[in-house]
Amino acid sequence: MWRFQREMKEDKGARWFELECVPKEYIFPKEYRPQNLDSPVCDSIPVISLAKSKAENGHSQPVEEILKASQELGFFQVINHGIPEKTVTDAMNVLKEFFDMQAKDTTTVTVPHKKGYIYTNSTYFAKDGVHLWRENVKHPCHPLEECIHLWPASPTRYQEVIAAYMVEIQKLSTRILEMICEGLGLEQGYFKDTSEVQFLSSNFYPPCPDPSLTLGLLPHIDPSLITILYQGGSTGLQVMKDGQWVNVGAIPNAFVVNIGNQLEIISNWKFKSAKHQVVTSTYETRLSIATFVNPSPNWIIEPAKNLVNELEPTLYKASQNMVNELELTLYKATQNMVNVLEPALYKPIQYKDYLLHSNAFGDDTAALQNGLR
Ligand SMILES: O=C(O)CCC(=O)C(=O)O
Ligand SMILES: [Fe+2]
């Protein structure tokens, strides 16, 4: 009798994912379920060392490699990035502690927006009534000094540790955008006063009894210039490549960088913004930190002037609704434009309007845009 009672008590204290089978609310319809869960990781996602290396002629090696990766898939990993390992480990530890603390308060679904951050547990994320297998915390990060004190106050080191992490991410993102600028042939400083590391979004994906039925994060394209993701050497991230989901390798101390929808537009579709999603694992917990490097809210996003010619834009590509490559080639051919003319493929739109119209962050879009204040 005593044993039975004890087991019951332990069950009551169990976290939402400590289960033997997947509750029906988390089971996706067949067409959404993950594919290629067990396939090997994709070694065609380039791993680029940012350590300085001299160029023989033209750009330095990292610039060449970033340019190629951004054109081909829009995903790459960077190593030798210069961010101290301790800054990253501290950030991962404090976020783990944060998620552990939320577990103790099982009633919390979401924190009121005025607190300066949004925490959501797994029951909040619904697609057609199905929940994602994750918890999430997100908050604005720009300007850093104005945001820090609005972030979670516990764990007590949260604000200090995450601020230190963000300072490093700001430096890294500036460096990567400068290289992109050089690679694309944009004028120096093109992104300098027009981009900001606006949000942090951290995900906790616990082990799942049956990963073939669930998703950690739905397929999406990021509404950023670039996104810098730390995934702590765990797997689960998948990228759509040639119509197939491929697994991104788990490289310790590397950052995954992906080209966002807005840079795809600025590059006039020279760069690709790839669809990605997160699948779950039976054994592994995945903790990720995504940081969104976005255009400043008032920046009017359009193809960079020196990447297009002076013609009136004649063919627009809606940002979410793509014209395929064949269609574009045929169009250029009929206009006698092959390799000669580069019409702008996108309509100009102010970034803050784009965010609102595309509802880029779902129900949280307006709150995040207003800095949660
Ligand atoms: O959690 C991850 O690994 C992916 C996160 C992501 O893609 C996003 O936040 O946009
Ligand atoms: Fe993403």
Image (cartoon, helix red, strand yellow):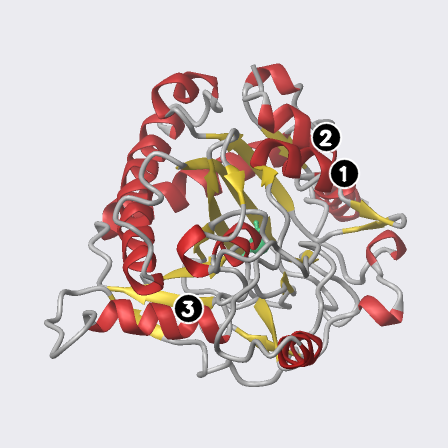
* Position above or below: 319 against 16: below
Callout 2: helix, strand or loop? loop
Circles 2 and 1: CB distance less than 8 Å?
A: yes
Report the residue at 34% width, 73% height from top. 47
Q: Residues within 10 Å of mark 2 (few under 14, many from 20)?
A: some
Residue 210 picture location, percent across and down: 74, 68
- Closer to the camera in the image, 335 or 46: 335
Residue 5 picture location, percent across and down: 78, 41
Report the residue at 67% width, 32% height from top. 365
User: What amino acid is labelled 2 in the image?
Assistant: Val
* C-alpha gap between disc 3 and disc 2: 34 Å
Callout 3: helix, strand or loop? strand
Q: Quadrant of the C terminus?
A: top right
Q: Earlier in the sequence, mark 3 or mark 2?
A: 3
Q: Residues within 10 Å of mark 3 (few under 14, many from 20)?
A: many
User: What amino acid is labelled 3 in the image?
Assistant: Phe
* C-alpha gap between disc 1 and disc 3: 31 Å
**Residue 345 vs residue 288: left or right?**
right
- Closer to the camera in the image, 321 or 186: 186
Q: Residues within 10 Å of mark 1 (few under 14, many from 20)?
A: some
Q: Report the disc number at residue 124.
A: 1
Q: Report the disc number at residue 76.
A: 3
**Residue 18 vs residue 213: left or right?**
left
Q: Report the disc number at residue 234.
A: none
Q: Earlier in the sequence, mark 2 or mark 1?
A: 2
User: What amino acid is labelled 1 in the image?
Assistant: Tyr
**Residue tagged 2:** 109
